[in-house]
């Protein structure tokens, strides 16, 4: 499973929990964490202050901690996802459990 698949799965979990998808900045923060980017880079790219990015990040880590049932933050996000095996998710559709939540890849058929 690549980073985009992980982000999509996390977005689906968040939507199932709170009825809202991750916003553009939240997705950018998660992508940036996978790529070892700094908050200053997000602020510049999204034309907002570093303080705004930090506040949005704090709220995101709180949300993910609640949804995933574990303490999630910028410094442990990638390692936590890898430890749970999400990054090595099988393309054969095998479920991966995180806490009490199962990730199951949807089959993709082309028409």
Image (tube, rainbow, N blue to C red):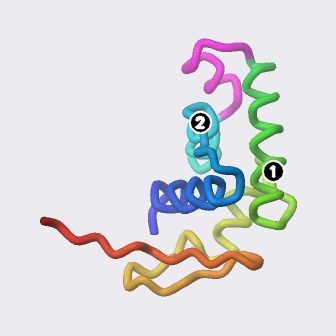
| Residue 60 falls left or right of residue 22 | right
What residue is shown with label 2? 23
Residue 77 image offset from top left, x and y in percent: 73, 56
17 in the magenta segment: no
What residue is shown with label 1? 73
Q: Nearer the viewer, residue 92 or 42?
A: 92
Q: Earlier in the sequence, mark 1 or mark 2?
A: 2
13 to 93, vertically: above or below: above
Q: Which residues are magenta?
A: 38-49
Residue 103 image offset from top left, x and y in percent: 57, 74
Mark 2 residue element: loop
Report whether residue 5 is seen. yes
42 in the magenta segment: yes
| Residue at 79% across, 51% down | 75
Res 76 quadrant in image: bottom right
| Residue at 73% across, 66% down | 80
Q: Are marks 1 and 2 in contact (CB under 8 Å)?
A: no
Q: Mark 1, residues whose alpha carbon is within 10 Å: few (<14), some, or many (≥20)?
A: some
């Amino acid at each position: 499973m690549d980073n985009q698949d992980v982000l999509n799965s996390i977005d689906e979990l968040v939507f199932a929990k709170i009825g809202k998808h991750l916003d553009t900045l939240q997705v950018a923060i998660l992508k940036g964490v996978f790529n070892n980017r700094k908050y200053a880079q997000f602020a510049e790219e999204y034309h907002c202050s570093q303080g705004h990015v930090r506040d949005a990040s704090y709220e995101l880590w709180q949300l993910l901690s609640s949804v995933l049932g574990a303490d999630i933050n910028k410094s442990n996000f990638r390692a936590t996802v890898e430890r749970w095996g999400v990054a090595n998710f099988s393309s054969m559709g095998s479920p991966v459990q995180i806490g009490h939540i199962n990730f199951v890849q949807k089959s993709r058929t082309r028409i």
